[in-house]
Amino acid sequence: MKINTKWIPLFASNFLGVFNNNFFKTLICLLAIHWVAKGNESMIVSLASGLYVLSYIFFSPLAGRLSKTMYKKKVMITARFTELFLVIIGSFAFYIESVYMVMVCIFLLGLVSTLFSPSKYGLIRDIGGDEGLSFGTGTLEMFTFFGAILGPLLATIVSDHYNFYVMAAMFVIISLTSLFSIWQLKVNESEPMKKSEDTIIPFVFEFKTFKFASSMKGLNLIILGLSSFWMIGSFLQMNLLVHCPKTLGMTNTQTGYVLTASAVGIGLGSFLAGLFSKGKIELGLTPIGGFGMTISLLILYFLQPNGILFGFMIFLTALFCGIYMVPLSASVQHSVEGRKQGDMIAYSNFMIFLLIFISAALFAVITKHFGTNAIFIFLVILVLTMSLMMIKYVPMMFARFKNLLKI
């Protein structure tokens, strides 16, 4: 499939925005630990992760409405302008070493990302049509995860060689480049709805959209499966930030290398899933990803590898994670056409970030009572349960899975 150059501004702005937000969030985790009493590492990591995703739980309905009643490109440009302002305020918070101010900034950055999300996913069909959904989704997710892990990698290096002025300059330059990228996007959108009567009250909206999704067999379970993927990613990232230095004795920079391995794995898995789908939504790839993750997580739990082998197993887990996710994400986007798609993406976001928020709380509890290695066996149970449920209850998944095994 020939790559349409119209994709580039969307991919670039998405990557840079995700990169900057995760750079900011991880620096909070690494530096704010030194601003408070020792022994609060897991608390700081959980708080920063929880605050970042809290907006997705309460403001996803509003984000869905904006993607229906406004031009999606305009929503994204406004979001990028707001992010630029927030990283400037956040830089000042780092300068005065204010835990409270940086935590407020991370919450507000999460809010901007919430409002941005349905619009960026909605533009995939506008740019590439139905035949571009798998490719566009896979590539967008690849760059999302490159940003989500390469941002933390840079943060680990910067934290080991901290210079406030270099850090602040990075925040602002990356934010400006992200704004410029989305400004260059050329796309023909459908006309926005003049008004929407749908509720933006979070749990009322979710209940109504859940009922709507129930009319399409297996869709709610696909959304739950997609949400579990993000929960897995959240657990892995938080666990690496604590497990690598505390259990494996790695420096922040070495921890960053492991985070990079997971970024490359998820990004490559997402891209490969988009290519293997060949313009279709290949649900048979999801069980392959699920069972691959199960095996690699079991190896991590029982063998407890260190060094290069640990990094390789994290890479392998992440690779299968990307393969697991892309068909689910593309299926959600394909389920509804037109401006109504914004509601479905908002509903999906709500479920995704509700589970991420829960993961932030569970992470603190599990690691406190059972240690960081217990996270790997917890993820085995989660992945295996979701894979088996989807094979049984999602139409065509088992048939497509069997068909792929014959190739």
Image (spheres, rainbow, N blue to C red):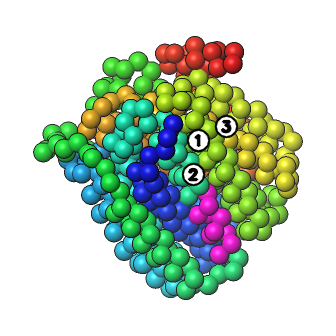
10 Å crowding of disc 2: few (<14), some (14-19), many (20+):
many
Q: Residue visible at 73% across and 47% down? A: 315
Query: The disc labelled 2 sits on which kind of residue?
Result: Phe
Of labels 3 and 1, earlier in sequence is: 1
Residue 174 appears at what percent x and percent y? 49, 71
Using the rendered view, name the quadrant where residue 385 is placed: top right
Choose mark 3 or mark 1, whichever is in front.
Answer: 1
User: In which quadrant of the rendered image does the C terminus lie?
Assistant: top right
Magenta-tinted stretch = 149-158
Label disc, if present, on residue 270 of the rendered structure: 1
Choose mark 1 or mark 2, whichever is in front.
Answer: 1
CA gap between label 1 and label 2 equals: 9 Å
Of labels 2 and 3, earlier in sequence is: 2
Using the rendered view, name the quadrant where residue 322 is placed: top right
CA gap between label 3 and label 1 equals: 9 Å
What element does badge 3 sit on?
Answer: helix
Q: Main secondary structure of the magenta part?
A: helix
Q: Pick out the residue farthest to the front.
A: 2
Label disc, if present, on residue 320 of the rendered structure: 3
Q: Residue visible at 60% across and 27% down? A: 285
**Would residue 157 be counted in the magenta stretch?**
yes
**Against 39, is 302 above or below?**
above
**Against 54, is 161 above or below?**
below
**Against 336, is 398 above or below?**
above
Of labels 1 and 2, earlier in sequence is: 2
Query: The disc labelled 3 sits on which kind of residue?
Result: Phe
Residue 28 appears at what percent x and percent y? 56, 70
